[in-house]
Amino acid sequence: MTKHNASNERIKHRYFEFLKEAKRQSTASVDAAAKALDRFEECTGWRDFKTFHFHQAIGFKKKLVEQKSRGSGDELSKATLYVTLMQLKRFFQWLALHPGYKSRLRYSDAEYFNLSDNDTRIAKARREQKVPTLEQIKHVISSMPPNSDIEKRNRALFAFTLLTGARDSAAASMKLKHIDLTANCVHQDAREVQTKFRKTFTTYFFPVGDEIRQIVVEWVAYLREIKRWGNDDPLFPATQVSIGPSKQFEVLGLKRVHWRNASPVRLICREACSSAGVPYFNPHSFRNTLVQLGERLCNSPEQFKGWSRNLGHEKALTTLLSYGEVPVSRQGEIMRDLAAPKEPVRSELQEIKDLLKSLKDPDTTRQNEISG
């Protein structure tokens, strides 16, 4: 049986080009749309999109609910259902306005891809993320040995992620020239560094401890002075794997190239957490840790805005909404503190009023002097 439709493939290609060039979506977003369309076509037997009817959407939703995850074998989560169906809804809405399809499709039929209101609430619900404490991250770093080149790199990568809050893709593409140890900052230049939304910004080292900064300083010095690497060489190079004396593939050291993607960064983090006996937390969660630290250290809106800009956010509200959630444990502490009885505290305004009153009343002032 044919597992593709030539007409569908042509229009899908145009749609993916539309997402990438007109909507400026990332490759990952385009891939998500392609995956959703593949699922739909498999369900309909690769029928031409021109024959789309809302009953196909209803039937697809029923089959999607019954599908199992290829990885875990469990039922697909409500979030997966929602994302898949929304991708299809947007595609058929676009298709219904496209020449050659306008006369065959109804724009409103795409609404049949909607989940129920209850399932949509479950899919979009924000759940508490497990955020590592600063002490946990430091414990992992302190347990990482700095003996071989690979071990030095891994420990420095862990420390660098905490020191700068850099995303894993940014750290994997960073060059030596991007770090300035004199100014204690990192220049995340989107022309060379894989930053989110290709934004260019400067990150100054977060106040997470001199010992963390020193690990990064020693790593940079090792690359420049011992390895004799230059500005355009990777800050965190890939691993050199080749056939060794045993005629098998072996790790031989560092390779003077960047990683192709951020997967090795997450693998290093997973292995380091496992070795330290700490539950796994991905590198991105370090940013949540830094936000919680900022909430404790910043004493003014200006300071928190600067902290937010240091994470690459243009608005402090982005930091608060995306990373500034109050953990349930902390929520309980706050409510217990508010419920605890407190001694009345005289405000400065009340003290000023009492002082003015005593100055206007000589008898009161004289009495206070005698009693004092």
Image (spheres, rainbow, N blue to C red):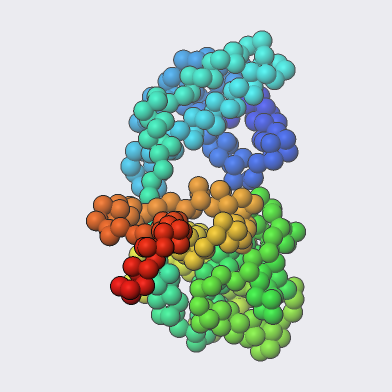
Q: Is residue 84 left or right of residue 367?
A: right
Query: Count of labels shown?
Result: 0
* Res 371 quadrant in image: bottom left
* Location of residue 336 by image quarter: bottom left
The residue located at (34%, 44%) in the rendering is 73
Quadrant of the rendered image containing residue 191? bottom right
- Which residue is more in the foreground, 186 or 4? 186
Residue toward you, 211 or 152: 211
User: Residue 154, can we see it?
Assistant: no
Residue 159 seen by the camera:
yes
Residue 135 locus on image (x, y percent): 40, 72
> How far across and down, in percent of the image, does residue 101 sit?
66, 16
Residue at 74% across / 79% down in the picture? Answer: 230
Give the residue at x 36% y 28%: 118
Residue at point 54%, 73% (across, down): 207
Please, is residue 83 above or below residue 353 in the view? above
Q: In which quarter of the image is the C terminus?
A: bottom left
x, y (%) of residue 127? 38, 46
Of 64 and 210, nearer the camera is: 210
Single out the residue that lies furthest toward the bottom.
226
Above or below residue 172? Residue 317 is above
Q: Position of residue 326 (x, y in %)?
A: 40, 53
69, above or below 18, in the image: below
